[in-house]
Amino acid sequence: MLRLLFLGTGTSQGVPVIACPCAVCASGDVKDRRLRSSVLIRTDTANIVIDAGPDFRQQMLSAGVSRLDAVLFTHGHKDHTGGLDDVRAFNYALQRPMDIYAEKRVQKTLRMEYNYVFTPQKYPGIPEVVMHTIDEQPFAIGGNRIVPIRASHLELPVLGFRIENLAYITDANYISPKEKKKLQHLECFVINGLRKERHISHFSLQEALDLIEELNPRQAFITHISHQMGFHEEVQAVLPPRVRLACDGLEVTVG
């Protein structure tokens, strides 16, 4: 059995957006407030975060996470990697380095942006990490088999991940037929749906719904949501019964 916690469900700017006067950004509904996209997956043997963006510290505190076994990165954009420095809190608490799983291209970005973490002469107190190189081949964390799903974010290759009957894909606007075969017989499918209008590098809401209908999971959740999507409750009211807009703090049991 898996437990999925949505730590953040917003786009690169979050919601509300700085200096935006729109009605959604001014909404008093907590479901219209979104940190940058990330999830925590709890299995019987491991706590795994997918993407640690700029809100990582706040998300860990809000969720009361005291143990974290690994961080998986989908790609190297700042809204998904900007919180790596804060894994040092877990270094102190757990007395061990943090296991990081990322493709070589993502590792290159991390080594550039966090060069002080990887320099031979390490400053006391910097994050300690163990880097694990992944590609499209399955791997395991704490005995949990993880299947990478290749997708495209415009021209940028990104990875989603399947763990048992749960799959999570964010920042994508194309998944090949070959990779879709890895997404069959899902109990829970999480997919990005930026807004109602088409977007150059993300699935729109309708495109996400079409993909959900094609894959036919038991339940599905839309994440990486922009303020341009509209009010949470209004959009949710017109979605199919098995599809929900994700919101920060939502927890789902899978299994």
Image (cartoon, grey):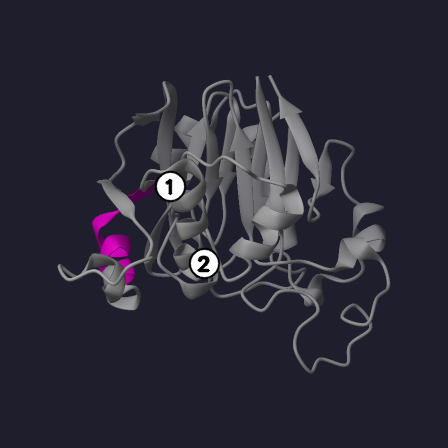
Residue 42 percent coordinates (x, y) = 54, 28
Q: Tell me the element at label 2.
A: loop
- The magenta stretch spans which residues? 99-110
Residue furthest front as drawn: 124
Q: Which image quarter holds the C terminus?
A: top right
Give how far apart the Cα atoms at labels 1 and 2 are: 30 Å
| Quarter residue 78 falls in | bottom left
Mark 2 surroundings within 10 Å by alpha-carbon count, few (fewer than 14), some (14 through 19), many (20 or more): some
Mark 1 surroundings within 10 Å by alpha-carbon count, few (fewer than 14), some (14 through 19), many (20 or more): few
| Residue at position x 43%, y 62% in the image | 82
Q: Is residue 231 left or right of residue 246?
A: right
Residue 253, disc = none
Q: Is residue 74 left or right of residue 231?
A: left
14 in the magenta segment: no
In the rendered structure, which disc, 1 or 2, sits on the residue that comes first in sequence? Answer: 2
Q: Amino acid at mark 1?
A: Ser
Residue 178 percent coordinates (x, y) = 34, 33
- Above-or-below relation of 183 to 64: above
Residue 12 percent coordinates (x, y) = 54, 65
Residue furthest left as drawn: 120
Q: Tell me the element at label 1.
A: loop
Q: Amino acid at mark 2?
A: Gly
Provide the residue designation for mark 1.
176
Provide the residue designation for mark 2.
83
